[in-house]
Amino acid sequence: MAEVELKEKLFDVSVSPHIRSKESIAKIMWTVNLTLAPAALFGAYNFGINAFIIIVVGILSAVLFEYLVEIIRKKPITISDGSAVLTGLLLAMCLPPTIPFYMAAVGSFIGVVVAKHAMGGLGYNIFNPAHIGRAALMVSWPVAMTTWSAMTTKIDVVSAATPLNILKQQGYSALIDTFGGASNMYQSLLIGTRNGSIGETSTILLVLGGLFLIYKGYINWQVPVVMIGTVGVLTWIFGPAGFFTGDPLFHMMAGGLIIGAFFMATDMVTIPITVKGQIVFALGVGLLTTLIRLKGGYPEGVCYAILLMNSVTPLIDRFFQPVKFGTKGVIKDVG
């Protein structure tokens, strides 16, 4: 009897070192959701009720699919941890405000079921689920995913096209003319009074949310700085009128670069482990984004750049392996 009581008091623990932390998956996920909320709500205000419904459908469908697939897989139900909400929210924020509502649900299904749970669930997915969902929608409904409408707010924007679309199709001069001058363009990009995907328009709100995540220690500052800086430097060097004639400020604020740099390239699951690896990752995303924007047929490249770099994250981790606790060497593969 005494032996049984002794066994009941024993606990199975992992190997040292033991690190205590008040952070949890739920706390981190819900914090990220809250930092995205201002930009999402601004987008809903900017584009109207259709955009708001897309956000709601994206979130609710992601949560529903997470619940159903965990029941099918006989796994613990984790819809309260905020990860499914985050996938649905990020996906919706990266969608045009005019798409049919069911497309948001299809994107959530692909992101949650195919990109996340087919890989084993949270922590095992190779690619960013929200961007997989967006990429799948792009190849399935390319017209709907590249059709833009004017904003519902009283902003004097002549064209319903996005700034990157205008630049790609008409050139830099037409872009400036559309906004009535460079200063008006920069102001629109900063505040968010421009056309684009629902949640990518307000640079200032996205940056503030990202800075809060850096303050909390949930993301490393090197990733957004290197990624955004790389795009800025390269678009300045390879300008439309020759070397060093580009507009880096425009390219750093246009499109989905800011939301991608702070909220998607920093995904803890799909990014390299070490800071050096993360810098290489961010540099690669910046290079690919610039290449697609300047030379590709599609005006924006953040989504595909992040997904391409997600695919080489294991390789980057092999080159930049973490240091063992208590040693100066790196962990070597002995398998």
Image (tube, helix red, strand yellow):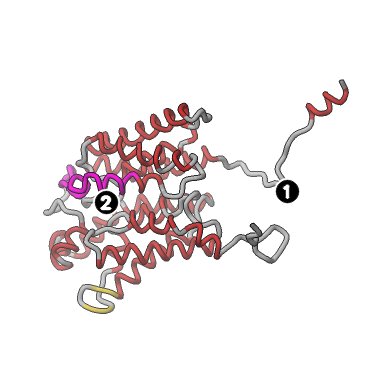
Q: Which residue is mark 1?
A: 16
Q: CA distance from mark 2 to mark 1?
A: 48 Å
Which amino acid is tagged 2? Answer: Gly
Is residue 333 positioned above or below 15 on the image?
below
Kindly identify the residue that appears in the image at 17 percent across and 49 percent down.
Answer: 155
Task: Label 2: state its secondary structure.
Answer: loop
Q: Which residues are magenta?
A: 133-154
In the drawing, what numbered circle is on residue 192?
A: 2
Residue, far front? 335
Quarter of the image where one finds residue 330: bottom right
Q: Nearer the viewer, mark 2 or mark 1?
A: 1
Farthest residue to the left: give it. Answer: 158
Residue 179 in view: yes
- Farthest residue, direction right: 2
- Residue 213 belongs to magenta span: no
Position of 80 relative to 200 (above/below): above
The relative height of residue 238 versus residue 151 in the rendered view (above or below) is below
* Residue sitting nearer the eye, 104 or 196: 104
Residue 262 lies, in percent from the top left, at 41, 54
Can you tell which mark lies on residue 255?
none
The percent coordinates of residue 147 (x first, y second) are 17, 48
Q: Amino acid at mark 1?
A: Ser
Considering the image in quadrants, where does the C terminus appear? bottom right
**Residue 187 screen position, x and y as percent:** 25, 58
Q: Is residue 146 rendered magenta in the image?
A: yes
